[in-house]
Image: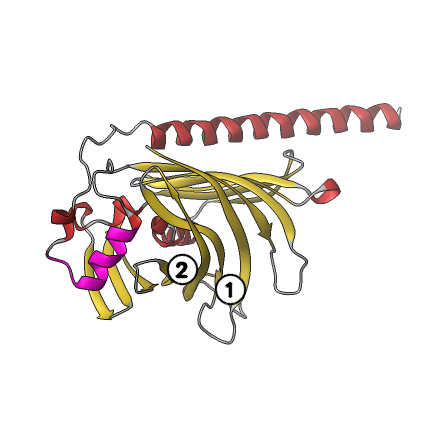
Amino acid sequence: MPTKILFAVGTLVAIALIILQTKSNTDVAQIWKTLQSQTPSIERFSKDMIADQPEPVQRYFLHAIAPGTLLANAVHLTMQGTIRLAPNQDWMPLQAEELLSTQGFIWKATAGQGAMQMQGADYYTNGNGRMRFSLWGLIPVVNADNPDVMRSAIGRWAGECFWLPSALLPQRGVSWCAIDTNTIQASFKADNEPMTLTFVIDNQGRLLRSSLLRWGDQTEDKQFTEIPFGGEYPAERTFGGYTIPSQMGAGWWFGTDRYFEFFRVTIEQAVFQ
C-alpha cells in the first residue's frame, strides 16, 4: 500500500509540474508574440538624424547603422556561449535566443547539461519583469517576480540596447553627450527609471565596451543596490545594415577589482524587424 501511495503522490506532483511548465511556456510565447507584433517602421536612417550630435556620437551611429537602413523596432538574436552563477563555479554551456525590442526584451535559454541542465526565460516588458528557470524544464529552480527583479530587468534591457542601435537614436527620446573623443553617454528613461549608458568607442566608431549602473544583489549581504555592470566586445558583425558586437563578455562590478564576469556569448544571427 505505501508503494502505491508514493506512486500516486509522485504522479500528481509530476502532473502539477507539467501544468506549471506548460503555463510558463504559454506566458513566454505570448510575451514574445507581443514584442514581435510592433508596427514595422518605414523610416530609414540618414546622417541628418544625428547631424546636431557631438562628433563621437555621430561616429558611433554612422558605424552602427548604414545610411538608408530601415529603423528597426526589434532584433531577434540567436547566441551561444557560457554562463556561471558564482565566481567559484564552473562555466556552463549556454544556448539562447532573445527578442530585444524598443518595448522590452525576452531571453529564452538552455544552460548546463545532463543532470544539471536548466531551461527558462528572463524578460521585461510593460512594467513587468520576471525570471523563470527550471531543471530539465520541469522542476522550478528560479521563479522571481518582484519590484527588484523588474528594476534589474530594466537595467538589462537598457544595457543590451547596443544590439538594437536604432532604439538609441535621439528620435527615440535618447539624449547623448560626449565625455571625450572616444567616450559617449546616452540618457533616457524606462518606466520612469533613469538610465545612463556609457560607451567607449574607437576611432572608427566601433563599440569596445559599455557600462551602466544596474540594480542587483551581487553584494555581501545580498541586498539590492546600484552596481556597476558592463561588458567588453572583442568582435563585431554586420547584419542587415546594422553593425553590432558579435562577441561579448559581461558581468557585475564592471571596471572594479570586484569584477565578476558571468556571461560570455557569440551572436550567431541577428534579424532586425
Q: What is the quadrant of the N terminus in the image?
A: top right
Q: Name the amino acid, label 2.
A: Trp
Taking depth in this image into account, of 17 and 261 the one nearest to the observer is 261
x and y, in percent, of residue 58 in the image: 20, 57
Q: Residues within 10 Å of mark 2 (few under 14, many from 20)?
A: many
Of helix, strand and loop, which one carries label 1?
loop
Q: In this view, does 47 lie to the left or right of 69?
A: left
| Magenta highlight on residue 17 | no
Give the residue at mark 2.
215
Q: Is residue 190 left or right of residue 52?
A: right
Of helix, strand and loop, which one carries label 2?
strand
Q: Residue at x 29, y 68 (%)?
A: 182
Would you say the magenta stretch is mainly helix, strand or loop?
helix
Q: Is residue 58 above or below residue 260?
A: above
In the image, which residues are magenta? 52-63
x and y, in percent, of residue 50 in the image: 15, 52
- Marks 1 and 2 sit apart, C-alpha to C-alpha, by 9 Å
Taking depth in this image into account, of 149 and 60 the one nearest to the observer is 60
Q: Residue at x 24, y 58 (%)?
A: 59
Q: How crowded is mark 1: few (under 14 residues within 10 Å), some or many (20 or more)?
A: some
x and y, in percent, of residue 127 in the image: 32, 43
| Residue 192 visible in the displayed image | no
| Residue 72 visible in the displayed image | yes
Q: Residue at x 34, y 41 (%)?
A: 104
Residue 230 position by quadrant? bottom left
Q: Residue furthest bottom?
A: 257
| Magenta highlight on residue 59 | yes
x and y, in percent, of residue 251 in the image: 49, 61
Q: Is residue 66 left or right of residue 136?
A: left
Give the residue at mark 1.
218
Q: Name the amino acid, label 1.
A: Gln
